[in-house]
Amino acid sequence: MWLSIGTWVSELSAKYEAESVLELIWILFNQFLVKVDDLVWGIPLIVLILVGGIYLTSRLGLIQIRKLPLALKWMVQNEEDGTGEISSFGALCTALSATIGTGNIVGVATAIAAGGPGALLWMEVAAFFGMATKYAEGLLAVKYRVVDEDNHALGGPFYYIERGMGQKWKWLAKMFAFFGVCVGLFGIGTFSQVNGISSAVNNFFDPNMNWTVEIPGLGTYSWTVIIASLLLSICVALVLIGGVKRISKVSQAVVPFMAIIYVVFCVVLLVCNIKAIPAAVVTIVQGAFNPKAVTGGIVGTMLIAMQKGIARGIFSNEAGLGSAPIAAAAAKTKEPVRQGLVSMTGTFIDTIVICTMTGLAIVITGAWQVEGLQGVQITTYAFNNGLPIPAVVSSCILMLCLVFFAFTTILGWDYYSERCLEYLFGGKHKLIMVYRWLYIFAVFIGPYMTVAAVWTIADIFNGLMALPNMIALFALGGVVAKETRDFFKRI
């Protein structure tokens, strides 16, 4: 029997050109992940998310257009007599800390690389309807949240499923909370963010891999990756100890500052290449509906462009995922509609503004067509070749933006997953502390996960988390519409 197993392993190793059993296991594991990802992010889920956004947009009368100016005004105008733990702006920054991250810099690049330039248009389509989805999530989070005597607020999809849909749906709420913990620990919160940080730091400080060390069983890594993962783990630990209020304070300081810097440099890049923008827009639109005409048959069908664009769009802005309402529930507010509007601005800022700029930069400079580039390297190429400054300066700016964006995303997703854990197990402090240290450990080992596996795992858990949340949004769409009508009549 052992001889036959050995023969089978040897045949597989030869088939996949694996040099060791460990490498063969990784190859087979990656293939398994891809199949699961294709199943989770198939046509049904894509249709569910898009139709959900269209449904809410219709019921709310294009609220993402009509009320966007008011939403942007209230975004920075906090309520004085609201109940909750943090300000509305603090809740938004906490949510943005989890959304503005590698998805804006790396996610856009991987979407365009895998689905062609047309993937960007599908990201925008998903984001437009996703604004109505995010509005509904924020509204329901505040309406059905639980606030104790100490103003400790707990809310999100698990509570608006349980309290809005009824106790018989509590199993669905627990399913969401379970997947929420998994997304934080294995998906958006840790591996993908740390992988993006380590890649950016390594590409800047040691692109030629001059200072390396062999890690048994894992491979050869640059010392910059090891040092970066260690420093990052320490910084994450120092912030997480302070809980949601410290996370909120760090997010309010870092997120607006780094977002403005990144947007400014993107605007400079677009202005310097303004003549190329019309052609880039044509390429994006054509690529959305006929990818083969743009990519020369490399990408494939329109469905692939749509799938990659929507998947990365959800990864970036999290509309429909159900994560942002967990932060919204902590806001000091007494008006669910008001917080829904504030939450809606997160999708606008994240995807309509930042992701669009990143995507245009990549298409204009042709970075997506350069062979051998992946992830952050694509965006770095775009910055290096599109900005009228030395490449070392643009690379440094992009690296710093990515590091701080991803750092705050790590913090935000720890908060989300801890709230999910609190719902599942009744807020046991010791259990949450154990999870917190597991989370920090996951941050530490993140750089040693392969790029393909990291993003595939994140995609899978994203999809599984979105399912129960979207079911709840369909079921409670009438509640959202009624609350909205009553609020605007009253004011």
Image: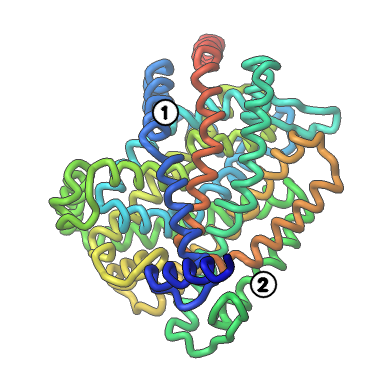
Q: Which residue is mark 2?
A: 231
Q: Looking at this view, is 234 or 310 the one in front?
A: 310
Q: Three-letter amino acid code at disc 2? A: Leu
The reply to whether callout 1 and callout 2 are in contact (CB within 8 Å) is: no
Q: Residue furthest bottom?
A: 210
Rendered image: mark on residue 48 = 1
Secondary structure beneath label 1: helix
Q: Quadrant of the N terminus?
A: bottom right
Could you tell whether 287 is left or right of 67 in the image? Answer: left
Q: Say above or below: 76 vs 292.
A: above
Residue 49 image position (x, y, % from top left): 42, 31
Q: Residue at x 31, y 72 (%)?
A: 372
Q: Residue at x 39, y 73 (%)?
A: 14
Please identify the quarter of the rendering in which residue 422 is found.
top right
Q: Is residue 101 visible?
A: yes
At label 2, counting other C-alpha atoms closer than 10 Å, the crowd grade (few under 14, some 14-19, many 20 or more) is few
At label 1, counting other C-alpha atoms closer than 10 Å, the crowd grade (few under 14, some 14-19, many 20 or more) is some
Secondary structure beneath label 2: helix
Residue 35 image position (x, y, % from top left): 43, 48
Please identify the quarter of the rendering in which residue 253 is found.
bottom right
Q: Three-letter amino acid code at disc 1? A: Leu
Label 1 vs 2, first from the N-terminus: 1
Residue 475 image position (x, y, % from top left): 53, 17
Residue 129 image position (x, y, % from top left): 38, 30
